[in-house]
Image (tube, rainbow, N blue to C red):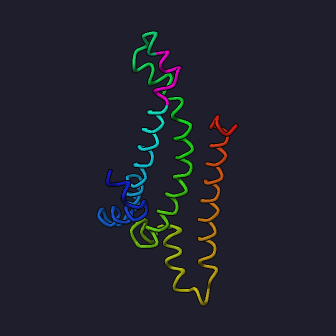
Amino acid sequence: MPFLACPFLILAIALAAFLGPSLTNAMIAIGVSASPIFVRLTRAQVLQIKVEDYVEAARAVGCHPLRIAVSHILPNVTAPLIVQASLAIASAVIAEASLSFLGLGQQPPDPSWGSMLNTAKNFMETAPWMAVWPGLAIFVLVLSFNLLGDGLRDALDPKHR
């Protein structure tokens, strides 16, 4: 997996530069860059769950492999994936703001916090509040999704109870 060897944001920047500057291309680049984490997590969870006693018992009584996958493995894989998705949204917000700041994401005159920060950097001495509000909005949104992910992990992970 060459995607895991390259940092998320660097890969997203490279893909967005290759695809061209637009919001759709930025979303594609962020999605492709974030997908190896989900693939790796899903594989690890399936490998861990498929050797559990209840899966072996279902296999021993003759359940079809598709039924085992849907009724035993899938419900136990979804909780970690939901938690990872809520944490990945925070990374995606930062990546989109970074791509827009660099001119590879949402293009002006359409609004984006990254392009707002890019415009505000020219006015830091005279109007620093132009950078404070978009930066604060990004900070609050990312913090909210991180806290949501931590809360979901605590609620959905039976090991943390």
In the picture, measured across the screen, residue 113 lies left or right of residue 152, that is: left
From this view, report whether residue 69 is shown above or below residue 28: above
In the picture, measured across the screen, residue 99 lies left or right of residue 136, that is: left
From this view, report whether residue 116 is shown above or below residue 7: below
Estimate the x, y position of residue 137 in percent, counting from the top left.
Answer: 62, 66
Which region of the structure is painted magenta?
49-58
Prevailing SS of the magenta stretch: helix
Q: Could you say which quadrant of the image residue 64 lies in?
A: top left
Estimate the x, y position of residue 14 in percent, counting from the top left.
Answer: 34, 65
Which residue extends farthest right? 161
Q: Which of 92 and 77 is in front in this view?
A: 77
Where the C terminus falls, by quadrant? Answer: top right
Q: Could you say which quadrant of the image residue 63 lies in?
A: top left
In the picture, measured across the screen, residue 73 lies left or right of residue 21, that is: right
Q: Nearer the viewer, residue 30 or 54?
A: 54
Estimate the x, y position of residue 81 in percent, counting from the top left.
Answer: 51, 41
Q: Nearer the viewer, residue 10 or 31?
A: 10
Q: Which residue is drawn at 62% across and 43% down?
A: 153
Which residue extends farthest bottom? 125
Q: How many numbered marks, from 0 up? A: 0
